[in-house]
Amino acid sequence: MSAPWRVAGLALIATLLSPAAWADEASPAGLWKNIDDATGKPRALVRITESNGVLQGKIEKVFTAPTENPNPKCEKCDGANKDAPVVGLLILSGLKKDGDAYTGGRILDPDNGQVYRSQVHLSAGGKKLDVRGYIGVPMLGRTQTWVRED
């Protein structure tokens, strides 16, 4: 192998082994397309951020049918979220790393106003996020798979 190719090859290997090269896939932080588990259609874009090891997620955009309100409100929510615009709504909160998952959080379903316990787990090399909402124990719930957008 000639010297220029050897240097280029070593640089590529060093880049791939760098933790920064894999940072996006090591954390759920980023923009995610929420896929409806019943219809398989996209519902929203959710921005997940991490602060002090705790994840939270806000809706950035909703996908609506032409006959639906393009600016829906959380009509069935309680408290401060009652009639709040869905865009900008904090729907994921309190998730902390626990092994290869993030657990102990809460997720709000803007369709019914209910808040459920939640946990998330990265899959497909960080390109998908399995989001589970449940009552009581994780076995009593449902999972949506979200797709990384950025």
Image: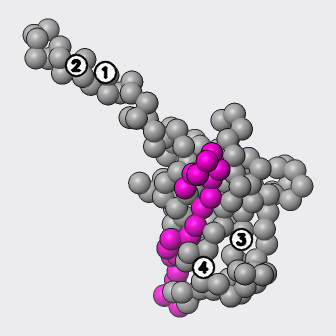
Look at the image and say whether residue 16 sits in the magenta stretch: no
Tag 1: Cα neighbours inside 10 Å, few (<14), some, or many (≥20)? Answer: few
The magenta-colored residue range is 49-68
x, y percent for residue 57: 60, 61
Horizontally, residue 39 falls left or right of residue 3, namely right
User: Which residue bears the numbered disc 3?
Assistant: 109
Q: Residue 13 carries which label?
A: 1
What is the magenta segment's predominant secondary structure? Answer: strand
Q: Mark 2 points at which residue?
A: 9
Question: Which image quarter is the C terminus in?
Answer: bottom left
Identify residue type, mark 3.
Asp
At label 2, counting other C-alpha atoms closer than 10 Å, the crowd grade (few under 14, some 14-19, many 20 or more) is few
Dot placed on the residue nearer the N-terminal end, 1 or 3: 1
Write the residue at 51% across / 86% down.
70
How many numbered circles are shown? 4
In 3D space, how far apart are the residues under numbered discs 3 and 4 (Cα atoms)?
A: 10 Å
Residue 113, picture quadrant? bottom right
Query: Which tag, 3 or 2, sits closer to the chain's start?
Result: 2
Give the residue pinned by disc 4: 86
